[in-house]
Image: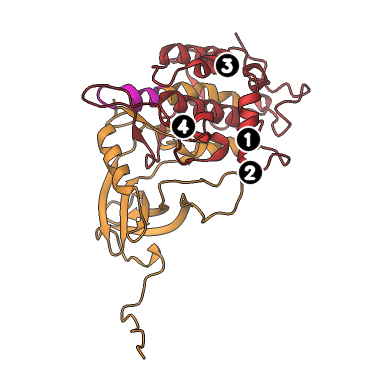
Amino acid sequence: MIRFDSLPTIFLIDFGLAQLFRNPATYLHIPFTTNHPVIGTLPFASINGQQGNAQSRRDDLESLVYTIIYSALGDLPWNSNVIGNDGKAILHKKTSITAKELCDGLPAPFCKFVTHVRSLDFDKKPDYEYLQSILSQCSGRTADQPVELLPLPLSSHVSIGSSPGSPTSPTFTGRV
Amino acid sequence: MRIPRQTAEKKRTSPLDIVRVDGRYRVGKLLGTGASGELDSSLMTPLLSSSGSVYLGKDIMTGADVALKIAHRSSPSRLGHEYNVYSTIAGCRGICQVLWYGKEDVYEVIVLDHLGTSLGDLVDRPKFDHRKIFSYATQMVRLLYKTNDYTKHTLACSSHQSGHFMIDTSSIVTSNPGIS
């Protein structure tokens, strides 16, 4: 096993759809508007985005929540054969699922992350430091601790592919 | 009766027909496409994206791999907008460098650093420890913070997903040069 001093750098790409959410000079936030085209990849789109509303910082974080869940569990609750690619059904599932249900199988503190993101108003600045501190609790390490990356020991392998909603899928133990 | 005139010039059908971009970057295989309607109706199909396909390329002067994002000039493309965004947030850790942007033949091209694997591909690997995602996620939040709120940057990235986070595998063994 190779140990590395730090985590690899993560890059964010594809800014073709990025847009200004406030005036760079005055910092005046864009107004809330509706009837926008739905953009992005449906399972990861925020509820607002899917409803055709203007998007802001909170939508970035909501998509991040879905990305984290998908990455951690290998699936999203609305990725099923029953729902398929039906936008309305996906939206209904997204709006009806509770934060607790959404975080099933994930470290317990992550529920606070979802709750914070869901509580944000359109023009509200997210508390990024708070969100990062939650993630540190979830990973059970501080940012400066060394972490091994590749290859991984088999003992730490987590089985995936089972339904995230299944009570018999103890994917994470979670360290609080 | 008027006979339609045949176009004398043979229409190019693929960016692979380009000999080199800017005389320097050779176009290789297709890595992925973000254009709406080109993929099947699977769940992962973007509904509307920045239109453009990403090709692997090679810098013939240095031998380094690059990524080429290419869109046909006849189709409405957001590559110019994307180039402006990259220019605005250049220098942040986790934002890749634009090596070249311009027009080549009938295409509009952005040449970017070639990164490692995407987060989406990484988590699909059978041996990936899925708890690692929370370590990575701290960086992902920081990236959003930087693009959203860092000094004059005021961008909402809009519907990113696991394929939009790239893991720079080269940075595993070397420290990252030229970043904050």
Hey, which quadrant is residue B17 in on the image? bottom left
Image quadrant occupied by the C terminus of chain B: top left
* Residue that numbered label 4 is attached to: A53
Residue A81 is situated, as x and y percent measured from the top left of the image, at: 72, 42
Asked if labels 2 and 3 touch by Cβ distance under 8 angstroms, the answer is no
Q: Which of marks 3 and 1 is nearer the N terminus?
A: 1
Q: Colour of chain A?
A: red
* Same-chain check, marks 4 and 1: yes
Camera-side mark, 3 or 2: 2
Along the horizontal axis of the image, is B90 left or right of A117? left
The disc at residue A43 is none
- Dots 1 and 2: beta carbons under 8 Å? yes
Q: How far apart are marks 1 and 2 (CA)?
A: 8 Å
Q: Magenta stretch?
A: B142-153
Residue that numbered label 1 is attached to: A90
* Tags 4 and 3 touching, CB below 8 Å: no
Colour chain B is painted in? orange
Read off the residue under disc 3.
A110
